[in-house]
Amino acid sequence: MSPFLENTFITDLGFGGGFALWGFRAMAAGCGGCRTLRGGFHKAFNQNAAGLRSPDEMTEGLLAMKALAGFCRSLGENGKRKILLSESGTMRLTADEVSLVAALSAAQANQISLCRAHLLWLQGNSKTKAACEAAAEYGLICAEAEIFIEAPRVQITQLSTSQTAEHCTPLHEARSDSVH
């Protein structure tokens, strides 16, 4: 079974969501210091923010990279499950990547309970505070630069009865000793 969503691509996420996922993939792969990544963040954030600088002389692009790296690091350090990511440069998306963008979108919209719900799924545990704070920080920096992360819109395809039977056991047929 393919890990990719059918008929859903990174371009369907809009600029804000696609850009965040592009950066997240690169950082998760250990390329957070890549010149291309730094240049992309500098260009995207300084184009709209007119080169704003923080008090410590960091550009908005570098501040955004730092916040997104904090989000990525928090998920990696606090999560109990592996998040399935596509390789950098891949157009296709995984369900986890859509959930990542949905969490960032919810944080930017100050929908903290929705953000935490996505993070709970992604991390596989309830230690979502640090990731939620990092997502909110990234969302705020994006909003100040007029980069908006839209909630992903994906079409869920229904499995046929034969596919469902292959991969799932109906709850009423599950043995009670197999439920943990």
Image (cartoon, rainbow, N blue to C red):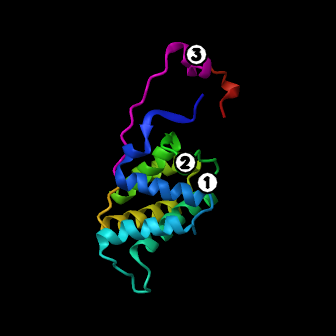
Q: Amino acid at mark 3?
A: Ala
Of callouts 3 and 2, which one flags the residue occurring earlier in the amino acid sequence? 2
- Residue range (magenta): 150-173
* Disc 1 and disc 2 in contact, CB within 8 angstroms: yes
**Number of other residues with Cα within 10 Å of mark 2, as a class: few under 14, some 14 to 19, many 20 or more:** many
Q: Nearer the viewer, residue 38 or 63?
A: 38
In percent of width and height, residue 153 lies at 36, 40
Determine whether, in the image, residue 160 is placed left or right of residue 153.
right
- Tell me what residue is drawn at x 54 percent, y 48 percent: 122
The correct choice, above or below, for 124 with respect to 154 in the image is below
Residue 82: x and y in percent read 63, 47
For residue 143: magenta? no
Disc sitting over residue 165 in the figure? 3
9 horizontally vs 27: left or right: left
Whole-angstrom CA distance, mark 3 to mark 2, is: 26 Å
Residue at disc 2, secondary structure: helix
Quadrant (top left, top right, bottom left, bottom right) of the C terminus: top right
